[in-house]
Image (cartoon, helix red, strand yellow):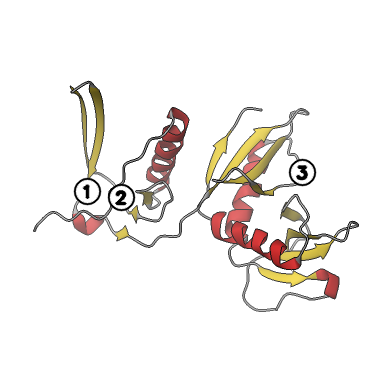
Amino acid sequence: MPEETIHESNRSRTRQGLATYLRRIARALRRGEPVPVDEAGSVTVDAAPTGDVEIELEREDGTVHFEIEMEWPDEAAAVDEDAAASKATFELYADSADQFRWRLRHDNGNIIADGGEGYADKRDAKSGIASVQRNAPGAHVVDVSRDEEAPDEGGSDATFELFRDNADRYRWRLRHDNGNVIADGGQGYASKQKAKQGLERVKSNAPGAAVEESVE
């Protein structure tokens, strides 16, 4: 069977960016999840339980090449060329009070969501992230300023609530069915449409976003 190139990319990355990408691959392998082939995660491959790994380090024409190649039987490595891609990263960090917090930062540098509270235990902060990843994509959106209520059917265990603050700006929060607010936008918007666009970015990016621990 002739060789087929499914995906190929070539770009410059900082050492930190490269480490982030490799950690995403390692985490997916460890958990048995689809492995992101590209940085956006739009192409993935299901790795078999065992496979062959070839590592090569060579120097050619003033350039050092460090190549890692992994191989699995074709029938055990399902490829998804249209996977849900995330353009954001969850940052887990400790604040000045030694409380653990998280924020969801878009690739453009903007913070599009945060947890709104600190946690004494890092595991609780990670659980908060997991809850947002699990519930945000399917959560219904309601305007509480108009007394809207979420439908009884469908959705997830949380609801996006749109509301107006004291400055008459629109904001959103993601409230779990247990009453706890598990995420908010952290800013006000001049229009409801802009607020909806903000929460839609969380809906689309939270599920596949990598979780990175940063130092404040």
Q: Which residue lies furthest to the right in this view?
A: 166
Q: Residue at (76%, 43%) from the top-left corner?
A: 117
Quadrant where the N terminus sits is: bottom left
- Labels 3 and 1: the sequence-earlier one: 1
Give the SS element for disc 2: loop
- Residue 63: image quadrant is top left
Which residue is label 2 attached to? 47
* Marker disc for residue 117: 3
Q: Which residue matches tag 1?
A: 72
> Which of pointers 2 and 3 lies earlier in the amino acid sequence?
2
Q: In this view, does 113 lie to the left or right of 67?
A: right
Question: Which residue shows up at 32% across the image and 54% down it?
Answer: 46
| Residue 11: mark | none
At 38% from the left and 53% from the top, the residue drawn is 34
Q: Nearer the viewer, residue 208 or 28?
A: 208
Q: In which quarter of the image is residue 122?
A: top right
Question: Mark 1: which amino acid?
Answer: Trp
On the rendered image, what quadrant is the C terminus found in? top right
Give above or below for 186 relative to 149. Answer: above
Residue 147's spot in the image, x, y percent? 84, 75
Q: Which of marks 1 and 2 is nearer the N terminus?
A: 2
